[in-house]
Amino acid sequence: MTIGLQIAWMISLPVVMILLVAVVFTGISLKVTARIDRRYGPPIYQPVIDLVKLVSLKTNVSHGVIFDWGLLVAIAGSSVALLMIPMGGIHPLSGSGDLLVILYLMIFASVGLGLSAGASENPNASMGVSRKLMLGLGYEVPFILILLAMMTYHHTTSLVALVAAQRATGVLGALRFPLSAVAAILIMPALQGVRPFDFVTAPQEVASGPMVELGGKYLALMVIEQSLHTAVILSLMVDLFFGGATNLGIFILKMTGLFLFGVLVNAVYPRFRVEQALRYCWRWPTWFALGGLIMAMVTKGG
Amino acid sequence: MREHKRAKMWTTHPYKWGQKYSLWPIHFCTGCGAIEIPPTMLAPYDASRFGMGPMASPRQANLLLLTGYLTRKTLKYVIRTYEQMLTPRYVISFGSCPIDGGLYYTSYNTINHLEWYLPVDVWIAGCMPRPEAFLMGVNRLMEEIENGTADGYKRYEENIDYYRRNQERTLGKKFLEELKQVEWLT
């Protein structure tokens, strides 16, 4: 990959992913959720209308410098994490050890949101951030065990090498690490922050949590951050368990499949309380992930 | 056909298009009208066809739904909520009570004329209006947004002295001083 092409992808890939998740995926999810509720639902381009509305508002309330920059830090963290992940043969930033960097950058985005929410001085925002960190505490344990299993088996911390290994042997990650894959599917809604794990942004409990003081252009920025985060989670899962793809189209198709799974779970299940979510995350997904790690250690080649 | 019309407006007035088809209401459910909101939003009448989705915080919302009577106590919070919303903001008043006091017009504690304290864009009469009436009101508001006649927020800014005078008369000087103390309000 030449330097020019690399820079072009570095700029265009986050934009493509924002448009894909914030417009296409969200529109599909609104319609699918409506049909599950036996409603007609909004038009499929409703997210575009909403974004235009948010940008067109005449007043925007800021709560200081940290309030503005926290959001931008979160967006930057998620964008860089996105560039680290190989997507259908495109990987502008990845080198060796990128799996560890992604783990770090995913927390970096939460920290940015936390800064922004703290500067807004709204008690609901603080509660939302504390709930977000608690949820992180819940899903990080099985998530790190899953990644450890893969790193141990393949003797690498590079995501590119993990995808290449799946393509070379022809065995998908989900088949080679079945227990880890089950654990990953179980914590997917928690990673995405959808129901039953949406107590972070619960409108009825904490008035949408970290987003409570965001309106207009700030809310549009938040939509961008959330769609980048969703894109990071989906593409990471596609790379780890479903073998990546040779081109971007097939990669996006696989992402769509995973996203629809999240939409269906979101439409059907009610919301967990914080302690229920922690109990869930530390019970079944952790046991499955631990089993997957032991299996990987036993079966790995010397 | 209607879908086609909705998509076509994007080419002529994109900002009006956004504000017309993306009304995010925040409910101020103090009165009996609150019971009409769930069937309107959920499967029986499905307000999301018009691009409406309930919001939790006044910063995110651009439509204030006042469902029923307002007392002196609740009016304070309605005014605070309204001033925290971002412009352009719209108000739909639901039921007879905010119009003229309705059933409670002799009560010492109920606000008889909401128009004195806040600019209202659409009134829906009835005790209580059914969800159909509510959706008609929303459609009326959409037409007004398209025509540019839904200018309640502009009236509030232009006639702020009038509204402040009425607010002071009913709620007392202390309320206005409290409003001034909260700098982040507007």
Image (cartoon, grey):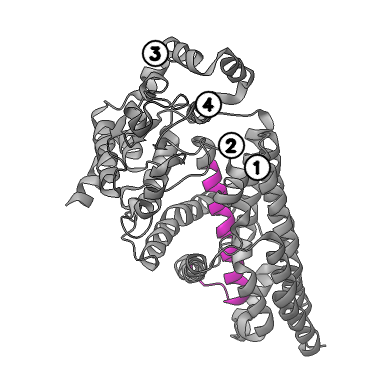
**A203 horizontally vs B10: left or right:** right
Tags 2 and 4 touching, CB below 8 Å: no
Q: Nearer the viewer, residue A97 or B43?
A: B43
Same chain check for tags 3 and 1:
no
Residue of label 2 = A213
Q: Quadrant of residue A236?
A: bottom right
Q: CA distance from mark 3 to mark 1?
A: 33 Å
Please report, as a chain letter, where disc 2 is located: A
Between label 4 and label 1, give the one nearer the viewer.
4
Amino acid type, residue under disc 4 in the picture: Lys
Between label 3 and label 4, give the one nearer the viewer.
4
**A202 horizontally vs A27: left or right:** right
Q: Which mark is residue B76?
A: 4
**Crowd tier of the residue under label 2, counting other residues whose Cα lies within 10 Å: few below 14, some 14–19, many 20 or above:** many
Residue A245's x, y, as percent? Answer: 53, 72
Q: CA distance from mark 3 to mark 2?
A: 26 Å
Between label 2 and label 4, give the one nearer the viewer.
4
Residue of label 1 = A125
The quarter of the picture where the C terminus of chain B appears is top right
Asked if residue B50 is among those painted magenta in the image, a careful observer would answer no
Tags 3 and 1 touching, CB below 8 Å: no
A282 shown above or below B56: below
Circle 3: element type: helix
Please report, as a chain letter, where disc 3 is located: B
Which numbered disc, 1 or 2, marks the residue that appears first in the sequence? 1
Q: Nearer the viewer, residue B96 or A291?
A: B96
Residue of label 3 = B158
B171 shown above or below A176: above
Q: Nearer the viewer, residue B177 or B152?
A: B177
Circle 1: element type: helix
Tags 4 and 1 touching, CB below 8 Å: no
